[in-house]
């Protein structure tokens, strides 16, 4: 039947037509019915005639078993009656009306309430005692009825001097549901009388009696005598583990068993007698027993052999399906499931299992691709993504987080969050104390692994990981250091750009006024100095304006270069000519080292001249007075390397990465700041547009080496 249901369900889920499902169900069921029919026919032929002759013996065995079963059922019913009575009393103690009447000490109302409740529940007795044991309400059926309970619960009690002399009692304390104060005790009871035994007989199907001190005090037997010992015949037999006695009452014969009724102390207070009428079932015991054993052995042997052969044939494909299911459970979704042709039910089940394997494999492939895509998408975004658990340990660290913090994913995973992220201001505490709430955003200044301060815009979230009880916290990190610096320096630029213009303009204005007023009286040497000052101021203004214009075009996205075949000699000469007045003013000598023959390159000569002017201007401003500045040109592979070395204060390693950004400036030895921080950013853009690179290195003996590489493609060596 189970195989039929499984096969029918699998076939229906596979979308098979209804008539095919019915054929599939009939195939296996027909074989099973045929096997059962063969076994029944064989049993009827072999054991039918002897069974017909031995029907009385079979009935006798059934009677013995029925008596034993009746005894077990009786014990179960008695225990159930105990539980029912205990539950009923407990339910009574929970009633608010009873608690209120006990609190009010209204014994008349309490008595009426108990009588009404006793009538509804068919209890023989229901009484209430106060906390000292005094009877408050209810009637006891005997002066030997126990007083206030010593133990709480349900138990059997002997009642001397009463009829029937045995009762089932249950007691429970009554507490105030709100205050928890003990209010009294409720005791309920059921008499084990003739009515009780008749009810037991109706429920068990066998006669019932209560035996107390050798006397039936209550019974459902119509012809029972008061004495018990004289009615028991000692040639009793056993059925199972219950002793069954043959009982004679007048002309009637019964099979009976005596069961102990124990109280809470496990002492026997009475016996429960279970009796079944068995007249006419004992006469053929020996002859029927031998015949039954022989016929049973023959039928059982034949059926077992046939059943074993058929079961072996039937379960062979099932064993193959079991092996296939075991492979699938261990993750083998590649090996196909074998599909037998018959029986139809197993074939349908195998086909459904194979379809499930294919669908599962396809689903896992799709989930794997989706997982790879999600991880690739997360790793490709610029922002960093970090997750950590409730213990503060990092569980995910994206490539964006690696770029921002300088920590690798292998070293960050499993570490506490505060060990990876350190606040730049130690007085603010730990990083975990400033994490924004879910969907909140907060700016935090931290130190990267190299010690460089960085400003992060941190956004928080609390996703729930699948198949996990803990809640993860996710942080999205965006490095806004450059944006913050740009905003700060942009404000600084707006505040100081006027100063950068005013200084050379003031110098030009003063020199021109002096020339206008004293031109007739000034010697040629002083006029030359004034004109040289005017020229330097004009060069400074021109450089500043060029950098401003280039920076504006870069920011607007309109920056472009115009390439042509250009000789480096002309570029070097033009840059030297522009910078010579500034070098002379600071008494600095420009040393140029170049190859014997400079190549012609395909580049924008105006832009490259601007690159050299900006680099030489920085070297002159930040080098001490009278120091030499070196311009070095080298051919390195397919590139031309241009380097300008100075003897300035040098560039700290932590600031070299940000030096070529807009509005970034360095202090000189005397604390003076030059320019507005645009020259090097323009240099970097021009060189990159030519396909080259820029950088700065430390110069041995002090100072810095600013360098740029330019590809030689398009030119001639």
Image (tube, rainbow, N blue to C red):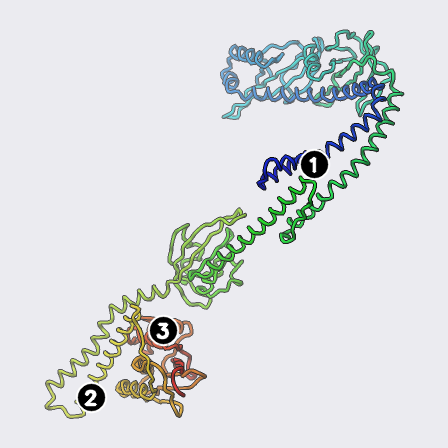
Q: What's the residue at 50%, 64% (across, down)? A: 408
Image side of residue 73 versus residue 543, left or right = right
* Residue hosting label 3: 660
Residues under numbered marks 2 and 3 in contact, where contact means CB atoms less than 8 Å apart? no
**Corner quadrant of residue 571:** bottom left
Front in this rendered view, residue 560 or 296: 296
Front in this rendered view, residue 26 or 237: 26
Q: Residue furthest front?
A: 19
The residue carrying pointer 1 sits among few (fewer than 14), some (14 to 19) or many (20 or more) residues within 10 Å by Cα, namely many
Vertical side of 234 occupied by 494: above or below: below
Looking at the rendered structure, the secondary structure element under dot 2 is: helix
Measured Cα–Cα span from mark 1 to mark 3: 84 Å
Which numbered mark, 1 or 3, is in the foreground of this view? Answer: 1
Vertical side of 231 occupied by 2: above or below: below
Looking at the rendered structure, the secondary structure element under dot 3 is: loop
Vertical side of 186 occupied by 644: above or below: below
**Badge number at residue 234:** none
**Corner quadrant of residue 654:** bottom left
**Residue 32 visible in the picture:** yes
* Residue hosting label 1: 28
**Residue 630 visible in the picture:** no
The location of residue 131, given as percent across then percent down, is 57, 19
Image side of residue 13 versus residue 713, left or right = right
Measured Cα–Cα span from mark 1 to mark 2: 118 Å
Measured Cα–Cα span from mark 2 to mark 3: 35 Å
The residue carrying pointer 2 sits among few (fewer than 14), some (14 to 19) or many (20 or more) residues within 10 Å by Cα, namely few
**Badge number at residue 529:** 2
The location of residue 155, given as percent across then percent down, is 67, 20
User: Which is more N-terminal, label 3 or label 2?
Assistant: 2
């Amino acid at each position: 039947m189970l195989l039929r249901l499984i096969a029918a369900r699998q076939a229906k889920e596979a979308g098979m037509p209804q008539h095919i499902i019915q054929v599939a169900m009939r195939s296996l069921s027909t074989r099973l019915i045929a096997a059962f029919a063969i076994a029944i026919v064989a049993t009827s032929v072999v054991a039918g005639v002897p069974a017909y002759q031995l029907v009385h013996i079979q009935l006798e065995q059934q009677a013995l078993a029925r008596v034993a079963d009746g005894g077990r059922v009786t014990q179960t019913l008695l225990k159930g009656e105990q539980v029912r009575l205990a539950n009923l009393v407990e339910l009574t103690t929970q009633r608010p009306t009873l608690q209120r009447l006990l609190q009010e000490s209204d014994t008349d109302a309490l008595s009426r309430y108990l009588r009404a409740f006793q009538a509804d529940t068919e209890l023989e007795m229901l009484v209430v005692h106060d906390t000292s044991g005094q009877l408050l309400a209810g009637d006891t059926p005997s002066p030997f009825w126990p007083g206030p309970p010593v133990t709480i619960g349900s138990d059997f009690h002997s009642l001397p001097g009463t009829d029937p002399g045995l009762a089932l009692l249950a007691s429970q304390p009554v507490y105030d549901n709100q205050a928890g104060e003990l209010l009294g005790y409720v005791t309920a009871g059921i008499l084990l009388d003739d009515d009780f035994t008749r009810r037991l007989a109706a429920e068990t199907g066998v006669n019932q009696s209560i035996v107390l001190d050798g006397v039936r005090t209550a019974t459902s037997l119509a012809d029972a005598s008061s004495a018990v010992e004289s009615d028991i015949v000692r040639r009793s037999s056993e059925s199972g583990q219950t002793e069954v006695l043959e009982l004679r009452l007048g002309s009637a014969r019964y099979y009976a068993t005596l069961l102990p009724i124990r109280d809470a102390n496990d002492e026997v207070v009475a016996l429960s007698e279970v009796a079944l009428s068995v007249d006419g079932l004992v006469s053929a015991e020996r002859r029927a027993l031998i015949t039954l054993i022989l016929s049973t052995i023959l039928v059982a042997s034949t059926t077992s052999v046939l059943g074993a052969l058929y079961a072996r044939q039937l379960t062979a494909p099932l064993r193959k399906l079991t092996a296939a299911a075991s492979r699938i459970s261990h993750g083998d979704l590649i090996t196909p499931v074998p599909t037998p042709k018959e029986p139809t039910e197993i074939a349908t089940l195998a086909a459904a299992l194979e379809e499930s394997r294919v669908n599962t494999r396809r689903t896992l492939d799709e989930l794997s691709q989706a997982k790879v895509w999600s991880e690739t998408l997360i790793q490709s975004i610029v922002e960093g993504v970090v997750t950590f658990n409730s213990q503060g340990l990092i569980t995910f660290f994206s490539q964006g987080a690696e770029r921002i913090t300088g920590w690798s994913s292998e070293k960050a995973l499993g570490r506490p969050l505060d060990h990876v992220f350190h606040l730049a201001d130690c007085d603010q505490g730990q990083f975990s104390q400033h994490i924004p709430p879910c969907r909140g955003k907060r700016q935090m200044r931290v130190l990267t692994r190299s010690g460089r301060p960085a400003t992060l815009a941190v956004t928080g979230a609390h996703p729930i990981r699948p198949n996990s009880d803990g809640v993860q916290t996710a942080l999205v990190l965006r490095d806004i250091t450059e944006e913050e610096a740009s905003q700060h320096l942009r404000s600084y630029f707006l505040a100081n750009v006027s100063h950068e213009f005013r200084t050379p303009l003031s110098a030009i204005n003063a020199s021109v006024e002096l020339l206008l007023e004293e031109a007739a009286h000034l010697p040629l040497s002083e006029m030359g100095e004034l004109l040289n000052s005017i020229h330097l101021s004009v060069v400074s203004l021109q450089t500043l304006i060029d950098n401003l214009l280039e920076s504006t075009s870069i920011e607007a996205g309109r920056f472009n270069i115009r390439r042509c075949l250009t000789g480096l000699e002309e570029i070097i000469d033009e840059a030297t000519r522009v910078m010579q007045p500034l070098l002379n003013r600071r008494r600095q000598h420009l040393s140029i080292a170049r190859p014997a023959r400079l190549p012609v390159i395909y580049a924008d000569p105006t832009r490259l001249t601007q690159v050299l002017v900006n680099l030489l201007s920085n070297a002159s401003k930040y080098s001490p007075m009278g120091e030499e500045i070196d311009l070095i040109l080298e051919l390195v592979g397919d590139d031309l390397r241009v380097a300008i070395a100075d003897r300035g204060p040098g560039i700290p390693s932590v600031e070299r990465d940000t030096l070529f950004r807009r509005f970034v400036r360095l202090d000189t030895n005397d604390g003076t700041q030059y320019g507005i921080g645009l020259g090097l950013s323009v240099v970097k853009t021009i060189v990159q547009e030519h396909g080259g690179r820029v950088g700065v290195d430390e110069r041995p003996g002090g100072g810095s080496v600013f360098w740029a590489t330019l590809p030689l493609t398009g030119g001639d060596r």
